[in-house]
Image (spheres, grey):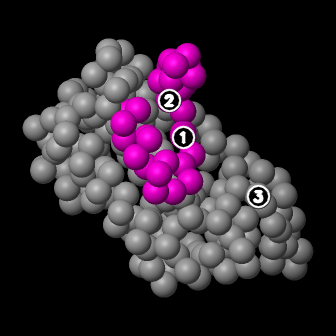
Amino acid sequence: MRLKKSMFFTLLFSLLIILCGCKKENEDFEILSYDYGVFLGASADDMDYMKQFKTIVIDAQYYTNDEINELKQNDNMVISYINVGAIENFRDYYNDYYDITLSNYENWEEERWVDVSQDKWKDFIINDLSTSILNKGVDGLFIDNLDVYYQYENDNIFNGITYIMRQLKKKTYISINGGDTYVYKYLEL
């Protein structure tokens, strides 16, 4: 839940910067340039707006290779969201991994925590999901829900996350969204 609140506040902060940075002149908004924008839930219809950000975070599962290449014009960096510690019921692979979920994600009815220590999940994230996302041409991955370790603080979950993260790091640039309990423990190694 803390992670979702963090994501919410990041989006809210980004929106406030955008709204405060634009001024209305003759019914048109001045186009500004920003360093970083998170656009989860956005669609290809929003791409013109997203292009004003140097670093663009999207859920690449919902974009084509051509759309991602268009976002990368002007040396923009495009990073894709990937949910490592939980699974949402709107994903087409949800039923394939429901059997290794741990519990409901409090306050997010569409989401469940996943047992990241399961080989089935590790293989899916590392070899299938991340590969399909990276093959679309994104520059890196925005890793979400490492807070599964906060919810299930045990060696199996810690080791599962660590294995996944090390394998993803071999493939691309990674950025972690939250997951402070896991990160602090990892830094103690």
| Residue at 25 percent of width and 31 percent of height | 117
Which stretch did the figure color magenta?
A: 161-189
Residue type at the position of mark 2: Gly
| Of callouts 3 and 2, the N-terminal one | 3
Horizontally, residue 157 falls left or right of residue 25, namely left
The quadrant where residue 74 appears: bottom right
Asked whether residue 43 is drawn in magenta, I would say: no
- 2 and 1 marks in contact (CB < 8 Å): yes
Amino acid on which disc 1 is placed: Ile
Look at the numbered disc 1 and give the secondary structure of its residue.
strand
The x, y position of residue 8, in whole percent, is: 56, 40
**At numbered mark 3, what does the secondary structure look like: helix, strand or loop?**
strand
Query: In x, y percent, where is residue 9?
Result: 62, 38
Where disc 2 sits, the SS reads: loop
Q: Residues within 10 Å of mark 3 (few under 14, many from 20)?
A: few
Tell me the residue that label 2 is attached to: 179
Provide the major secondary structure of the magenta segment: helix
User: Where is mark 3, residue-wise?
Assistant: 35
Residue type pointed to by label 3 = Asp
Q: Residue at position x 48%, y 35% from top? A: 4
Distance from Cα at disc 1 to Cα at disc 3:
17 Å
Q: Does residue 108 lie above or below 50 as drawn?
A: above
